[in-house]
Amino acid sequence: MGSRTIKVGALARVEGEGGLEIVIRDGEVKSAALNIFEPPRFFEALLRGRGFAEAPDITARICGICPVAYQMSAVHAIETALGVEVSGPLADLRRLLYCGEWIESHMLHVHMLHAPDFLGYAGGVEMARDHGDVVRRGLAIKKVGNEIMTLVGGREIHPINVRVGGFYRAPRKRELATLVEKLERARDAAREVVRFVAGLDFPECERDYTFVSLRHPGEYPFTRGRIVSSRGLDIDASQFDAHFEEFHVQRSTALHARMRHDGAPYLVGPLARYALNFDALSPLAQEAAREAGLGPVCANPYKSIIVRSVETLYALDEALRIIARYEEPDRPFIVIEPRAGEGAAATEAPRGMLHHRYRLAADGVIADAVITPPTSQNQSMIEKDLQSLVAGFLHLPEEELRHRCEQTVRNFDPCISCSTHFLRLDVDRG
């Protein structure tokens, strides 16, 4: 059997740009490599020398889709360094803001980026011509997430109301009440989204992932919890560097990540959160998952679209719960005095666990900052999935094979602009 080369200029429907090269020899996939070639963005260097209070607004600019995750990871890590813990209504507001981000990000991915793969369309616009009601329903749910971001975060993109210690302004109870009816309608619609995506045609495959996510004894993880894995890991966020390491590969400007003890890749994101926290989902979300045919663990990466839809339903349910019990805080933030210290924190961005570590000088200036985004953590697993799963599609014509490669990458909803950027595909069959 011979060999051949397939090249794709750029992968569509992911955030950012990059290249993909697959080498096939004698009917076997010899290698699959992501080549991320965009320049580093130097956010860690940009943070050094800045006051700790500047971190939420700077880190929010890392991503326009999941800015809250960057803000919250930063403020939690800095608060740990300063010996501060935010609880009560302020912690609830942070969780509500996170609900908004999950809703808008997941619905964007499901309807505009990933669903077209399953239905045979080039993108969300083409899909809308035949499935207008489905796309409009998804965008209507996304809009409710944006409204939460605006009300709690100050604006829907790059929120400006978050600060170390709390918020610049806490919303009034009556302001949050204006969201209730919209959230209830969106929750009903999200239930229909779960049913819709469950009916898509999925390739049969099960992967033996090492799942990694946060886990908290009292809640489905957004902003707090211990880092756990499906292989028994259970650590505090401050121990992240002892168990995970980033490394550079020559072909890419973005760092990869692996388990430190055995060098193995691992998976963060919806599948990992779901598998490690199914029992913490609301009864409504659990019921929808079971109705969609999912058990407490889903290891088919193509079904991540179902898990994202279940998580959206959960976020809407959780937002309603938070609003129902919300009491306005006496003041919107805790007053913090600067001091020297080091702190780490992890939160759950829509795409997976995000880890931040900061070292502060005595005057509160950031002396060092290290940010490990979810896409960097998943890059090695993306390559491993491609090498394993594409082998089952080699009989397909070139165009269909390219489509499967892109779909396999989009299972991860990579946000390349967070880690740098992504994707051009070159398949080399020799």
Image (cartoon, rainbow, N blue to C red):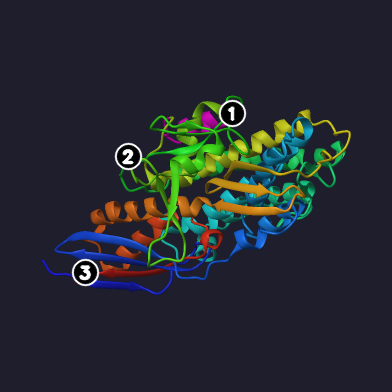
Q: Mark 1 belongs to which amino acid?
A: Ser
- Determine which residue is flagged by label 3: 429
Q: Which residue is mark 1?
A: 282
Q: Is residue 201 above or below residue 419?
A: above
Q: Are marks 3 and 1 in contact (CB under 8 Å)?
A: no
Find residue 65 and name its label: none
Disc 2 target residue: 208
Residue lying at 79% horizontally and 31% vertically, measured from the top left: 326
Q: Main secondary structure of the magenta part?
A: helix
- The amino acid on which the numbered mark 3 sits, given as a three-letter code, is Arg
Q: Quadrant of residue 179?
A: top right
First reached walking from the N terminus: tag 3 or tag 1: 1
Find numbered disc 2 in the image and state the secondary structure of the residue it sits on: loop
Q: Which residues are magenta?
A: 282-295
User: Which amino acid lies under the numbered mark 2 shown in the image of this protein?
Assistant: Asp
Total labels: the figure holds 3
Front residue of 306/16: it is 16
Q: Residue at x 38, y 62 (%)?
A: 249
- Distance of label 3 from label 2 (alpha carbons): 27 Å
Q: Nearer the viewer, residue 392 or 164?
A: 164
**Which tag, 3 or 2, sits closer to the chain's start?**
2
